Amino acid sequence: MLKQLPTNAIGYKGKRSERIYRGMSFKETKQEEQQLGGQMSFLEHLDEFRRRLVNSVIIVVIAFALCWFVSDKIYNFLSVPIRQALSEAERREIPVEGLTGSEKVLPLNNLHEGDSGRYVFDRSTKLGVSVVSPGTSVLAKAAKDGEGKLGLFTAEPLFTSNAIVPQGIRLPVDFEHIDPTNSANADERMIVTTAVEPFTLYVTVSLYTAIALSIPFLLWQIWGFISPALYRHERSYVTPFIGLSTISFVIGAAFAYYILFPPAVKYLLGLGEDFRLMLRATDYFDFITLIMLAMGIIFQMPAITYVLARIGLVSATLLINSWKISLVVILIVAAVVSPTGDIPNMMLFATPMMGLYIISIFIAWFFGKKRQKDPEVENL
């Protein structure tokens, strides 16, 4: 028969005291707490949450400091898709046809020592005291300098409005770092509207990159917060959870960068072909980082399903029975993440999510099992 709890025992050791007064022995209570990872009060949960949050902030700050030193390289990497899209949107395509039919356009790194031709400045360039305007051309020749490095040099004097650029001046071409796939020039550069915007842009790029790089450590903090609510044998899934989630995030971000974003931005820029495109750099990077982070999180679906199925919280039957609700949620998420509200763009984002949901069903069916307590696992 259950015993009445005295009024002064309510706050004494919380649920442990309650179990003891209800007839459970101290040994039985201790065993149950070990199975469940121990009981924590509401304030203890808040303190644990605060500690995990502080650790996460410290991790992101350290990663941000490292990313800041390479923020320009991160910027160049993330800006490649939009610059290529702007290049295609701004330029008039003309088929390469020649006298013999064998003529073709080659990348600049195909130049050899002694080759000559006219070099065209694609942006304002300062040479000494003179400023060469974009579109200016000069006869140039490929040759090696005193250190034996191949370079492109002026083969004739160039007269500007205030100076004479003599023959033999090195032109701004670095043969060692030419990217044949990057065909963007000054016309495809994005714009900034304030003096502090470049600094803010690099800070934003570094912060988003720091969050992405910190994903494994942030997942570790999340697991550390929820693990006390799991049985002892269930905590062994921490390694597959962090490993699969990290890999899924990278795959999702890469999928957004290489697969989803190029056709989406090409479609958007195609709508403005009758206008002069002046794209703000801040708007673009907010856009692409949102898509990459969102798809990285969305691609967590199979990894999370695997862990929950192994624990016994999710089953294939549950996912199949909930497909209608899941479909509505997927379409809502796709509408939020996609750059426009039109159906083709939205389906571009919704289709991979539907595929991930189907994969999650098979994962839950293959790896799922009924949830067990520690004694049940030990007795197997």
Image: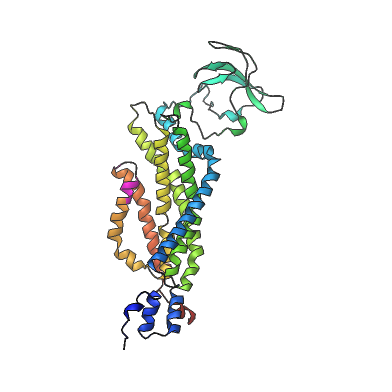
Residue furthest out toward the front: 8
Q: How is the image coloured?
A: rainbow
Query: Where is residue 37 drawn, in percent x and y?
Result: 45, 72
Vertical arrangement, residue 130 with respect to residue 9, above or below: above
Residue 339 in magenta stretch: yes
Query: Where is residue 173 drawn, in percent x and y?
Result: 59, 26
The residue located at (40%, 60%) in the rendering is 359
Residue 263 in magenta stretch: no
**Image quarter for residue 150?**
top right
Number of labelled discs? 0
Q: Confirm whether residue 247 shows in the render.
A: no
Vertical arrangement, residue 144 with respect to residue 266, above or below: above
Vertical arrangement, residue 275 with respect to residue 334, above or below: above
- 13 displayed left or right of 102: left
Which one is in front, 187 or 287? Answer: 287
The residue located at (48%, 73%) in the rendering is 233
Query: Where is residue 31 drawn, in percent x and y?
Result: 45, 80
Which one is in front, 108 or 255? Answer: 255
Q: Where does the N terminus fall, quadrant-wise?
A: bottom left
Query: Where is residue 133 drawn, in percent x and y?
Result: 50, 17
Q: Confirm whether residue 129 shows in the render.
A: yes
**Image quarter for residue 231?**
bottom left
Vertical arrangement, residue 1 with respect to residue 59, above or below: below
Magenta span: 333-341
Residue furthest out toward the bottom: 1
- 125 displayed left or right of 143: left
